[in-house]
Image (cartoon, helix red, strand yellow):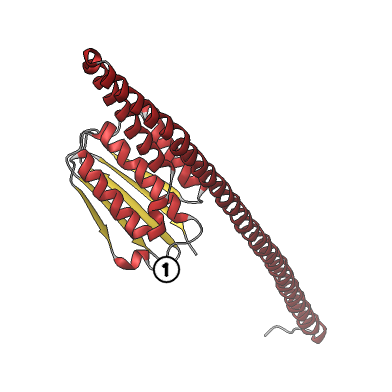
Amino acid sequence: MSYTPPSVEIDTIVAAACLLAAISLLLLWRHHRQRRELATLHRMLSHEREQRTLADQALADTRKQVHHLSTSQQSLRDAERRRIARDLHDDLGQQLLALSMDTRALAGRHPDLSGPLTQFDQRIELAGRSMRSIVRDLQVEALESGLQGAVQQQVEQFSRLSGIPCRLDAEPAAFLNGPGNGVERVVYRVLQESLSNIVRHAQASEVCVGICRQQHSLSLTVRDNGVGLPQPPAARGSGLRGIAQRVAEAGGRFDIASSPGFGTALTMSFPIQ
């Protein structure tokens, strides 16, 4: 049996203890470093969350300001429309009426000119009808009875004048308390322009108007079974650009779904209070 001196055993024990101590210190240092890194990462994440919250709040404030400005501009435009409509009705309307009366009086004094003067008077009457139609389009008197009545009237008028069946799908709850924020005017004008576009371009035999209300939004969908929109999108007319502009000014969203030969669906969503 070999003999190990006590000093060697002591040295081995001390070396092992030193190694364990070094390993413990190393593990403690790594743990401390990881905690510092985690704390730094947590501070960075907290800072990022704060910055994101501030950015979201700034974006929300900007949207409110844009919407308020758009509402003010819409009110100014509506006031200008009413002024123009009033001037057309009072001034041009009176001039056309006087011209018609003079024409009839002239035809009575000159029976040999009654034929041409009658045709001239008929053209004056057509001009008066066109003027009255323009006045109706400029005014928003239909909204005095509420959005529901205005939309129903617009749908019925479209069917009567165009001969194209038009169905309104909307629950009464969609109109309760009114959308507010001037959205009624925008919805009415957008519907008016959408139906006019169908008459001019769609060659449709059926139209459906849908209105749906959620907690913070009001959606309007105008769908037809016509020829669809031309491709590429750049070929689309000014009517759709006007609709898109109105929707954007109201802080809304405008989507188009269309394929040549398969009709078109316009969907507009407006924020409401």
Q: In the rendered image, which quarter contains the N terminus? A: bottom right
- 28 relative position to 64: left or right: right
- Relative depth, front residue between 238 and 257: 238
Pick out the residue farthest to the front. Answer: 109
- Position of 27 relative to 154 (above/below): below
Q: Who's the residue at 40% across and 55% down the image? A: 143
The answer to whether residue 55 is seen in the rendering is: yes
Residue at disc 1, secondary structure: loop
Q: For residue 231, say whether it is visible.
A: no
In the picture provided, is 50 more to the left or to the right than 137?
right
Residue 163, located in which quarter of the rendered image?
A: top left
Where in the figure is residue 125, as x and y percent of width and height? 30, 30
The residue under label 1 is 177
**Residue occupying the point 49% across, 55% down:** 182
Is 188 rendered above or below residue 118?
A: below
Name the amino acid type tagged 1.
Asn
Picture residue at 43% right of the left edge, 38% below the top: 89
